[in-house]
Image (tube, rainbow, N blue to C red):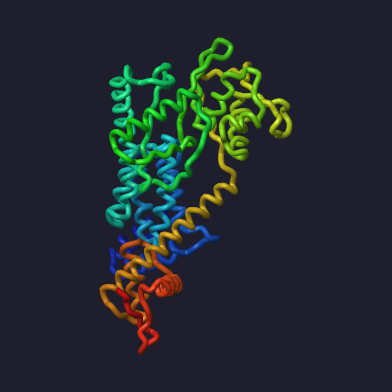
Amino acid sequence: VSFHQGCYRMVDTAFQGSPLFHKALKEAFEAVVNFRINDVTVGELLAERFNSLLKKGGASKTMSSASLTEEISRIVALFCYLAEKDQFAEFFRADLAQRLLENRSNSMEMEKMVIGKLKYACGAQYTSKLEGMLTDARAAAETSKKFSAYLAANQTKRIGPPLLTDQGGEFHARILTSGFWPALPEEHLGLSRSVTATLGEFERYYEKKFGQRRLKWIHSLASVTISTKIKGKQYEFLVNGFQAAVLLALNDHAHGLTIEALTKQTLLPPNVIKRVLLSLVVRSKLLLKKPKKDYKLTDVIMPNSSFSSAQRRLRVPSHKASKDAKTLSRKKTMTAISEDRKGAIEAGIVRVLKARKTMTHRELIMEVSSLMMSRNHFKPDPRQIKQRIESLMSRDYLDRDPNSSETYRFLG
């Protein structure tokens, strides 16, 4: 980023902004920025840099607002040289989702500014999902306020087990529009009666308000504050949904439960509950494990009655995904990008041939490549286009001209 800024300044000053040198600078940086390093693209690295600048406690913590704005502008200038902007968008979207859902964004205004710069560079369609995510994040407070009003108005009509709000607790739901956010797996979790009742009440409220929209709960992204007394001292523990499920499962079992019993009660997969227990037993020491060595399903997990801390409000570290899981997540993102590109190329081929009716192979490759770069923000390999042509031919969308094997016809 700094090197590009220096080169740009040199062209503007020493070469007096010569168009010839600006063209040479553009071509040179296009070659550098689109060069792969050990299968890692510059698009990924730029997304990581944005994430570092925009998250709390990141690289921007020692920067002034003006310095941060200038650094963002420099990165966007480098971003403009990218040929595979669709790939950058997917990694940026994944990082943005993490910042918003974990409340780790340094500033919503700064997020909006970055997305605005990307929108100016690539158009409204490119940033529509990112803008939708910010809209969802801003709407969360209003959703909670309306649900609280609904509960107050229907309190006397409600039957069944008490809700969290009836027991002095608070409940806030964040609605994520599935088309905007990265794909998230549906999760099953053993919850207390009051939590289950609260979720059910919110689903009824949401159905009355929006009709047949289906809600899918992502418990691992929940943020839970648990208040408790240990040795006469009041504490508040900030945990995620999985950690809360384990802690609440042990609430009525002072002598503990085996890992096997905890797994059955919480419905957490064995590999997940192992990581959750690692955060609660080893990292935060809220729980104890007997025996301490090894890890067996018959080991007993119990509350740590001797827990002590100078802080009254503690954030329990989340269980981190393993390096293998992160590699798998990256692989899934790359696979999703590849599948999206297949659909985009096929749509482009049909669009072009439908308008032109017949085209030579060379003309079709050139027109589709141009369309993908302008509309879908990536430069397809000619081999990819050829594969999609063959796929469309097998499905009778087009065929070869019987008088010329190099010419394709649209079958409308």
Please tell me which residue is depicted at 32% across the width and 17% down the height of the picture: 156
Please tell me which residue is depicted at 61% across the width and 40% down the height of the picture: 271
Classify 351 as above or below 258: below
Mark count: 0
Camera-side residue of 11 and 128? 128
> Which quadrant is the N terminus positioned in?
bottom left
Q: Is residue 36 left or right of residue 362?
A: right
Quadrant housing residue 289: top right
Residue 15 picture location, percent across and down? 31, 65
Q: Please, which residue is most extreme toward the bottom here? A: 403
Q: Please, which residue is most extreme toward the top here? A: 232
Camera-side residue of 170 and 15? 170
Quadrant housing residue 126: bottom left
> Which quadrant is the C terminus positioned in?
bottom left
Please indicate, yes or no, whether residue 25 appears anywhere in the rendered image.
no
Q: Is residue 80 left or right of residue 338?
A: left
Residue 303 picture location, percent across and down? 61, 21
Residue 390 picture location, percent across and down? 43, 74
Q: Please, which residue is most extreme toward the left here? A: 355
Please tell me which residue is depicted at 54% across the width and 34% down the height of the picture: 318
Residue 223 picture location, percent across and down? 45, 30
Please tell me which residue is depicted at 41% across the width and 30% down the height of the picture: 199
Camera-side residue of 247 and 380? 247
Classify 116 as above or below 187: below
Please indicate, yes or no, whether residue 45 appears anywhere in the rendered image.
yes
